[in-house]
Image: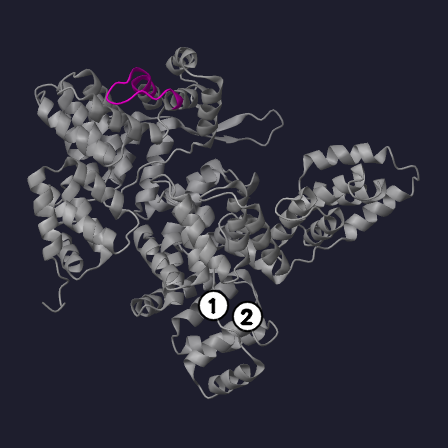
Amino acid sequence: MKDLKPIRILMMCLMACALCWPLTAEDFVTLKKKAADGDVEAQYQLAEVSFWGQGTPIDHNATLKWAGKAAEQEHALAMHRLAVMYMLGQGVEQDVLSGIQLMESAVPGLRKLAATNNADAQFKLGLVLLYGTGSNIDSNAALELISAAAKAGNPMAQFVFGDLILRDNRKEPDLKATRAWFLKAAQQGLPRAQLKLAAMMLEGVGGPRDEVGASTWLRKAADQGHANAQYFYGQILGEGKGVPRNAKTSIEWIRKSAMQGFPAALFKLGQIYHRGIGVKQDPKEAYFWYSLAVRQGNELAAQLRSEVIRKITNSSDIPAARKRAASFRTQPTETTRRSHLGIPGGGELMLITIMVDGQKLKAKAGDLDAMARLCGWYIEGLKINERVAVEKSPRKSLELARKLAEADHVSGYWQMGVFYTYGLKAALREPDKNHEILIKPDPAKRFEWLLKAAEKGKTEAQLAIGQCFEGATGTKLDYKKSMHWYRKAFDQGDRRGAHAISMMYRTGRGKEISKDLEKWEYWLRKSADLGFAMAQHELGVALYSGEDIKKDQKEARVWMLRAARQGMAKAQHGIAVMLTDGDGGPQDPIQAFKWSFLAATRAKYRDAEIMLNVIVKKITPAQQREAIALARAFVPRPERPSVLKSLGKADVKQLTAEANKGKAVAQYDLGRLYAIGVDVEADRVQAYKWLYLADQQGHPNAGQACLDVLKKMSSAEKRAGLKAVLAFKPAGAPK
């Protein structure tokens, strides 16, 4: 997964799953008696049913009471529930810092429960590891846990896992799998899954187009009070998609959504009364709904409201409509509130606010990691949906960087180095908006600060210091030291380090580093294997031309395509040329046009613009339209292998022991180490064995990694790999 932005750090706290069984009044009485007698599991369950309103009205006070009692007995799931409530201020005064601390305290207990295949614990721990609380982020372990919970039937886990598959930027999304998981969650009554599934069915994404099926799922979600579903169900009723057209019922559902404050529904009602769609034209009513939409930031509603004003003849009607709009209060259902708090993209502004407040509290208390995050946010500011969550303040950023440096924190050293690289300005308060120079660029001071960060293990600083020694920036020329720092960066997992080493061997560096094309190819391939787009493109170019390497246009096409998929314009142009001319494989004018179009329109790459004029003569208008549609749907997907860093012999030994016990994450990580030759000798047979075993257990990244290794294996290696797989038995398993 891509390095996750702070926007989403606390989202996991909000994705709690309801109990999956129906609860009668009799069950509730029994549960309450057990809880009163001290049964910790009953106390937790009673807290949950009180929170969700199962067999009893929603009662956050009761949830706090019983979750608190269970938490006193170190019930991890109860501690998780309390953490969520403190962070959001549900039934208690909001205390973000306490909530974060409580969440972190729950993690060891969640791990123990997850190890017993408790699906609820697996899901919640997975979210903690995925989004983190400022620490403990482990994307691969998170996916394993969420996947396990989904397979065990947890509806929220099924929905989230499907959504994660859709959002995985390391490979093309498996739309069919996403749709299948949304279906499983929808069948268990989860309204947000029903909504997402309906959207995919309407558009024919991940499976056949099915308007009737989509309308059925939308109605199910709408009946549960989901505002988004109510609006879209109203829309399809008005259009007659999958259901008989019914303008009156359509407006009723859109109104239900609007009463909950759904922005699109507010605007749509304004249009309905403005244009008289299924109702008599009513400028006053249109003005009212447009006003509510304007309050949500809809600029078009503001323009149309001005048009409506001219049609209102009675001057007293406008103040009345304004007063009515000012007094309007949304009435979101519990389903809608949970939906906005529980899915990626929902309630993000509130979440970022919570998270920022929490980090400020931590920073104030002396938490250095929190100070580091704030320091980074203050440089450019932090926005979500064009709304400011953290104001831009170079002055505050500098203040925090200096404090961090005084405390011997690597982020402080790094940030000071960056400041002395580019300089730092702060706006003055005067109307002319002049700037005060806080720090002037200074190569010597830049080197001083970056060296401290490099010595503390920051790979970006190690690469920068390597460049300083290679280019005599702020220090004396020293190619051996440059190579030393590039190797340090690579050993810690930075693929750019391998690329920098390869460049030194390509041409040589003085007397210290001799030209060595064998080593150049070795390090370039390492960097490319690890997913660095620049290295992939350079390797593709070299293989295409045969310069300093054996010519292989078929392999060149593979590397060029991998770099193109990451969004590199030069590679997109390169693969377009190869697809046009049929170099390294068959011609494909549609794909060629797609890649040229992307490079030309998104990156304004001049060579691609010229190439477009060549390709357009070779395809039909229909093919051109298809290519443009493919280009517009394209999303760059950076390659980010999970294991890059050097672990050390002791850690590799521990990793091997875990892999031998049958743990999929360890098997995947060990397979990657053997594939790229970090800490162990590169060994395709061992890489294939461990990656294959991890894939068999459902590791989300192992399958593709295994295929990548398989493509490079000889026939003898393939036979040896298969033999190793068949011979494997987990440690402790009966022979």
Q: Is residue 717 left or right of residue 299?
A: left
Tell us which disc is closer to us: 2 or 1: 2
Q: Is residue 129 left or right of residue 470?
A: right
Q: Which residue is tagged 2? A: 51
Q: Which residue is tagged 1? A: 81
Q: What residue is rendered at 56% in x and 59% in y?
A: 338
Q: What residue is rendered at 9% in x and 67% in y?
A: 735
Residue 335, magenta (yes or no): no
Determine whether 168 is above or below 564 in the image.
below
Magenta part of the chain: 576-590
Q: Which callout, 2 or 1, points at the residue further toward the start of the chain?
A: 2
Q: Amino acid at mark 1?
A: Arg
Q: Amino acid at mark 2?
A: Phe
Q: What residue is rendered at 40% in x and 20% in y?
A: 593
Residue 219 placement: quadrant: bottom right
Please tell me whether mark 2 sits on a helix, a strand or a loop: helix
